[in-house]
Image: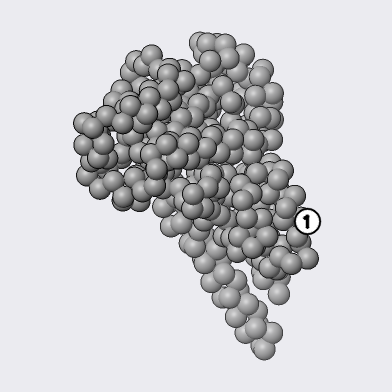
């Protein structure tokens, strides 16, 4: 049974680390919401647009009548959007020193060029900055 | 002996699961990445930022409808109201709305998310974009102009409020049926797509 257990735990670790390392793309998170809740939104939240406050509120208010799939997924989808937004804005802060140290030629405030410089993988980049880039889905 | 066989079967099953786990998401990701990359390429390569006045463009469209010029009465004969937009890097997204309303259908949420992903790409972070709403030629021209403006505004609101793209990078304008994407077929659904156009450097 040893190898089975080992393989199983390896699988678990792989699934966990891939889930925790990178936040979900907006396309996928919004796609989950649109697919799982299409009918629920039509039936209960007609006229409400994709909005992290109003649509979430509407689904929450109607949760007693939501399909089980929508009930399972809507919170997860909004969370995923929120997590990626947070991960993207964290990059600026967590990589500030790295940009100053390794990307001297980049004009100040040019986030796009700064990111491209960091993504080229300068030697000696801090672990926190590397992790932030990974969580934001930039690499 | 028995537990050994069980064990091997267990490993076999796990291997199948592992292979499936690894193989399944790959084609889906490649496909989605492909579409997103296509948009990325289409928005890149702005040479000179145009001198674009969105408020004036809105007024121009309104004036043309009010003037009711005979020359452009039929949609098929109407010249584009903002030909300068056609020369800029852009793509059109087939976003579905509720009929006669500025409410995005849930089946198009994925596409709005994909627009957000695209505009967050490092190579585009330094740019500003114009969201252009259009409609087909059925219904009144004035109403279509208003509807397309509301739809463009709603896409802008989503990108700003839900996906936190900087409002400074996004403007929105509705051109109704004044700049058909396929003027030879004024009622074709392609004419109500939403365009994203690169218009300049981010402030």
Please provide percent x and percent y for residue B118: 48, 37
Q: Identify the residue at image location x=61%, y=23%.
A: A124
Q: Is residue B41 visible?
A: no
Q: Is residue B75 left or right of residue B176?
A: left
**Does A86 appear above or below B167?**
below
Q: Is residue B162 visible?
A: yes
**Does B76 appear above or below B70?**
below
Q: Identify the residue at image location x=43%, y=25%.
A: B58
Please provide percent x and percent y for residue B32: 45, 50
Please provide percent x and percent y for residue B64: 34, 27
Number of marks in picture:
1
Q: Quadrant of the N terminus of chain A?
A: bottom right
**Does A114 appear above or below A25?**
above
Please provide percent x and percent y for residue A127: 67, 30
Disc 1 chain ID: A
Looking at the image, which is closer to me, B35 or A116? B35
Q: Identify the residue at image location x=64%, y=63%.
A: A43
Q: Dot 1 corresponds to which residue?
A: A61
**Does A87 appear above or below B202?**
below
Residue A89, image quadrant = top right
Q: Quadrant of the C terminus of chain A?
A: top right
């Amino acid at each position: 049974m040893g190898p089975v257990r080992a393989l199983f735990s390896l699988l678990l670790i792989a699934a966990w680390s891939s889930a925790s390392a990178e936040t979900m793309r907006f396309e996928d998170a919004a796609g989950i919401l649109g697919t799982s809740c299409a009918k629920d939104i039509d039936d209960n939240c007609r006229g409400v647009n994709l909005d992290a406050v109003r649509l979430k509120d509407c689904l929450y208010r109607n949760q007693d009548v939501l399909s089980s799939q929508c009930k399972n997924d809507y919170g997860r989808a909004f969370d995923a959007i929120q997590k990626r937004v947070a991960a993207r804005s964290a990059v600026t802060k967590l990589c500030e020193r790295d940009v100053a140290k390794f990307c001297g030629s980049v004009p100040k405030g040019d986030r796009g060029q700064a990111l491209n410089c960091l993504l080229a993988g300068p030697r000696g980049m801090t672990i926190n900055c590397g992790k932030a880039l990974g969580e934001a889905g930039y690499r | 002996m028995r537990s050994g066989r069980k064990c091997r079967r267990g490993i076999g099953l796990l291997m199948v699961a592992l292979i499936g786990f690894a193989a399944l998401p790959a084609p889906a990701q490649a496909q989605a990445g492909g579409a997103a990359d296509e948009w990325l390429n289409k928005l890149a390569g702005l040479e000179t930022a145009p001198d674009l006045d969105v408020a004036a463009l809105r007024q121009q469209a309104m004036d043309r409808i009010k003037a009711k010029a005979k020359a452009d009465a039929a949609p098929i004969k109407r010249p584009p109201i903002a030909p300068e937009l056609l020369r800029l890097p852009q793509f059109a997204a087939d976003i579905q709305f509720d009929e006669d309303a500025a409410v995005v259908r849930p089946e198009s949420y994925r596409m709005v998310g994909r627009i957000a992903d695209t505009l967050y790409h490092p190579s585009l972070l330094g740019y500003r974009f114009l969201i252009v709403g259009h409609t087909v030629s059925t219904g009144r021209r004035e109403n279509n102009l208003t509807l397309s403006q509301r739809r463009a505004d709603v896409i802008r609101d989503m990108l700003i409020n839900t996906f936190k793209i900087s409002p400074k990078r996004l403007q929105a304008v509705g051109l109704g049926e004044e700049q058909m994407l396929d003027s030879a077929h004024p009622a074709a659904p392609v004419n109500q797509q939403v365009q994203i156009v690169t218009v300049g450097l981010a402030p």
